[in-house]
Image (cartoon, rainbow, N blue to C red):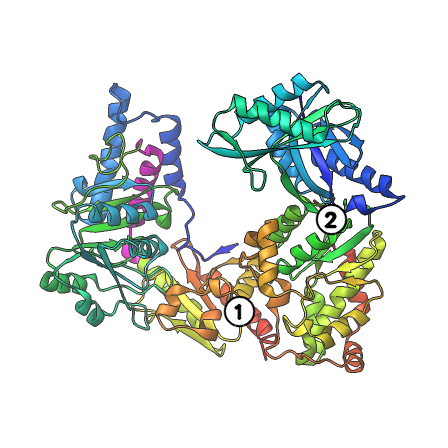
Amino acid sequence: MIYLDNSATTKVGQAAAQASTMAMTDMYYNPASGYNAAVQTEKRVEQARQVMARAIGCDSSEIVFTSGGTESNNAAVFGTLIKTRGKVRIITTAAEHPSIFEQFRYLERIERFDVKYTPVKQDGSVNLEALEEMLTEDTALVSCMHVNNEVGAVFDLRSVRELMSKRSPNAVLHSDGVQAFLKLEEKTPDVDLYSVSGHKFHAPKGVGFLYVKSGTNFGGGQMGGGQERNLRSGTTNVPGILGMEQAVIDYTQDMTQKHDYMRRLKQRLYSNLRSLPDVLLNGPSLAEAAPHILNLSFLGVRAEVLMHSMDERGVCLATGSACSTHKKGKNRILTAMGIVGPRQEGAIRISLSPLNTEDEMDLTAQILFEQVQFLRRYRRR
Amino acid sequence: MEHVILVRYAEIHLKGLNRPFFERKLADRIVDALKPNTVKVEREQGRIFVYGVPEDVLKQAVDKLTRVFGIHSVSIARCVEKDWLSICDAAVEMVSEGKTEDRLSFKVFARRADKRFRFSSEQICHELGHILLESFPHLYVDVHNPSLKVTVEIRQFAAFIYCDEYMGCGGLPVGCNGKAMLLISGGIDSPVAGYMIAKRGVAIDAVHFYSYPYTSPRARDKVVELAKLISRYTSEINLYLVPFTEIQLAIYDGCPQSETTIIMRMQMMKIAERIALAHGCQALITGESLGQVASQTIESLNVTNNSVSLPVFRPLIGFDKEEIVDKALKIGTYETSIQPFEDCCTVFVPQHPTTKPKLEKLLESEKLVDFEPMIARAIENCELVKI
């Protein structure tokens, strides 16, 4: 099977799986307990925290372990808003993942929040001019993703920060870094809060973290026994954390080569499809996009049908649009980018990991070629 | 004092000499519906009494019975000896267990099937009403619009007292009117159509067409789930899953574009009919509603009808979409139906299907492809799921 849905989740690395297993069968103690074995476990968790901190480029006291991307995003929004008073503006972009977008939609119902959505450009990146106009003195939170999960557009967080310093100096800047962490050359930009999910880089599912820049006015996430410096209660997920630690160590080795490698794979796949007519690239150019995401529209083909027929041939990839025949299935993010109609109906997302090979790209291109040509015979006429 | 579920018939009471047949069918259905509990069922003068349901599952049993066709309504009753004091005690106990609002209007109803009982119906109402008023100061009588109805039925062998009445679905017990084959798509309409025909006492089997690999395995699971939801009202359903891709592709390769949908419908009907005949079904059921889509115009229905000889039941033919949705919500299939998966009808659809097909023309177009071996293969490769 050729697995090309690495933005959905990734295969857990052998070493990471072993680290998790060890924490389940040997180092199974609760780090909050008092005896020596628990203290040793706590020390291991703190080591892991340092590994995360190094990858982000921050102090280990700024890392809060969570259950993953959705929880980090929820904690970021609620932990920030709970510290605000009176009527405040909160801003996000039209291209966010549901774990941010749905929160903002919900907050629209609460009168004291003035919710704004910054439009995105056709390449999927944030429209900075529009954002600048939205930023006000009373803006409390700006949540802007780092890499878009559908098309791989990289958002210019440095410029977002600059605009905020000028117009909304008191606002907190959160970024959903789930698709960006370990995938970009640039160091993590200057943000206040940053969400990370482990299973997007070969760690187990159910673990991630939220970077909280020291000094940020942040109220924390779920409440309870006071773990994670009282910012995220709940028994520490030692197996997840140690698995994620190993995954970060593995991924950061030769990281630049990994990025170059994935970009080359993407280029190879794209070039192989060049002779197929009516294939459109969605999002930014291959060079500008995150190295692992490629979104293509095959005009005249319905993505869901293509996805199933690729599945039958042993290739796993994702549809841009869940189901074109039902209104509900419209893809909000592609629509926000202005990708609509047949272009959205035929949109497929291919997302890579360093485990993919050149042969897989060639084979995938060949099968795509066959399937698209075959299905186009039955296009709507 | 024993708990008993009292079941009232729906339409069966209109039956004449063959009424015992329908009563027996209904009794069988009740026993089936209440499995795994073993219950005893007694029939008496237009009522069925169900004994032996454990007290902790009485509410669930009532819930199940309200989905058994042929039942007008059910009540949980106390069964006592036909002795005035026992009757009064039971009534007082039932009221004290029930509603506790500050002020509560009530009325006593009495039905005296056993005319030997010493009080007349009217006397029962008066006397019991008096006792309840004395026992519960918060009660007051309202004979026009009571919020609490206490009913006493004096039967041949015992007296029954009950308060609440739960409405059933009506109709006739499944199995008393033969068996039919439902064409189920996964949409909103076909489950409702199946429900409506089953309600008339018809046992249901179902056939579903899928286009592997172009339809999702989840679309298949969805149809299985829908069949399960329908089976809550019917007896066991045999669901036949028919691979349809080969035929679809042949239609699109060989037939005029605008006619592909209607020719596809014709082949579906043919396959459904053959499976139906092989398994003792005497009719086909579809969820078609006149004019809803291109294949459901009067001309299109005429063409699809022509491809089979079994009668085709279309219970939704005169329904608006909104009415169908209401019904789907009521029977509990709507939420499952609206899960968004491509089904075989939507995978390959022409942009402009014909809405006024001519039978002669269609029969000519159908000849462009040799469907017979493909139909045989589809039937041979169909998969049976017992629901």
Disc marking residue B171: 2
Front residue of A248 and A45: A45
Q: Is residue B177 left or right of residue A220?
A: right
Q: Residues within 10 Å of mark 1 (few under 14, many from 20)?
A: many
Dot 1: chain letter: A
Amino acid found under the numbered disc labelled 1: Arg
To which residue does mark 1 refer?
A: A302
Query: What quarter of the picture does the C terminus of chain A occupy?
Result: bottom right
Viewer can see residue A376: yes
Type of residue at label 2?
A: Gly
| B3 sits to left or right of A226 | right
Q: Which residues are magenta?
A: A235-258
**Residue found 60% across the figure and 63% down from its top:** B214
Residue B202 screen position, x and y as percent = 78, 50
- The percent position of residue A330, horizontal first and vertical second, equals 45, 65
Query: Can marks 1 and 2 be said to lie on one chain?
Result: no
Using the rendered image of the protein, determine whether residue B35 is visible from the camera's viewpoint: no
Q: Position of residue A21 (x, y in %)?
A: 40, 33
- Label 2 is found on which chain of the structure? B
B2 vs B350: above or below: above
- Indicate yes or no whether the magenta region holds residue A255: yes
Magenta-span inclusion, residue A349: no
Residue A177 falls in image quadrant = bottom left
B331 to the left or right of B386: left
